[in-house]
Image (spheres, rainbow, N blue to C red):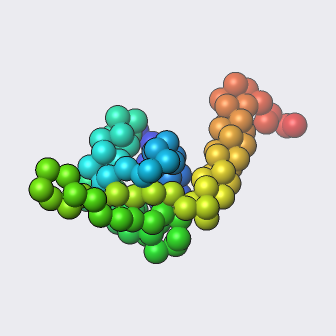
Amino acid sequence: MIFNTGAALLDAIVLSVVSRDKEGTYGYKITQDVQAVISVSESTLYPVLRRLLKDGCLESYDKEFQGRNRRYYKITSTGIVQLNMYKREWYEYTLKINKLFDGGYQND
């Protein structure tokens, strides 16, 4: 994708990915799911996870997997509210951009 992905969009994408599993999901899986949609490095995503934890949008817990602890992330009620706000904003934004691309907003 040639368009830059800002912090708010990354937050929205990560919240969306994490929200798909009620029990939460682990960091590497989040990275793989996000990378399936946009080009972003792991080193970019882990600060996003830390920020969302700090803001109370995610919570984390460790769970043993094959003899090692794996860190899981789970969306909180605050995160659900934030994700819903991002979805509304994204919908309105894309409507406006699509209208512009389709020739709208010419002396409206």
Residue 28 visible:
yes
Q: Is residue 58 above or below residue 32?
A: below
Residue 13 visible:
no
User: Which x, y percent locates residue 7?
Assistant: 47, 59
- Residue shown at the point (39%, 65%) measured from the top left: 60
**Residue furthest left in the image:** 67
User: Which x, y percent locates residue 75?
Assistant: 51, 57
**Residue furthest right in the image:** 108
Q: Is residue 66 above or below residue 52?
A: above
Q: Nearer the viewer, residue 93 or 32?
A: 32
The image quarter in which residue 106 lies: top right
The image quarter in which residue 39 lies: top left
Q: Nearer the viewer, residue 108 or 18?
A: 18
Query: For this view, does 76 lie left or right of residue 41?
Result: right
Q: Is residue 91 above or below residue 66?
A: above
Query: For this view, does 92 lie left or right of residue 23?
Result: right
- Residue shown at the point (46%, 44%) measured from the top left: 21
Quarter of the image containing the N terminus? Answer: top left
- Residue shown at the point (67%, 31%) measured from the top left: 98
Query: For this view, does 67 lie left or right of residue 5?
Result: left
- Residue shown at the point (36%, 40%) measured from the top left: 33
Q: Nearer the viewer, residue 61 or 54?
A: 61
**Residue furthest top in the image:** 102
Number of marks in the image?
0
Query: For this view, does 5 lie left or right of residue 67?
Result: right
Quarter of the image containing the C terminus? Answer: top right
The image quarter in which residue 32 lies: top left
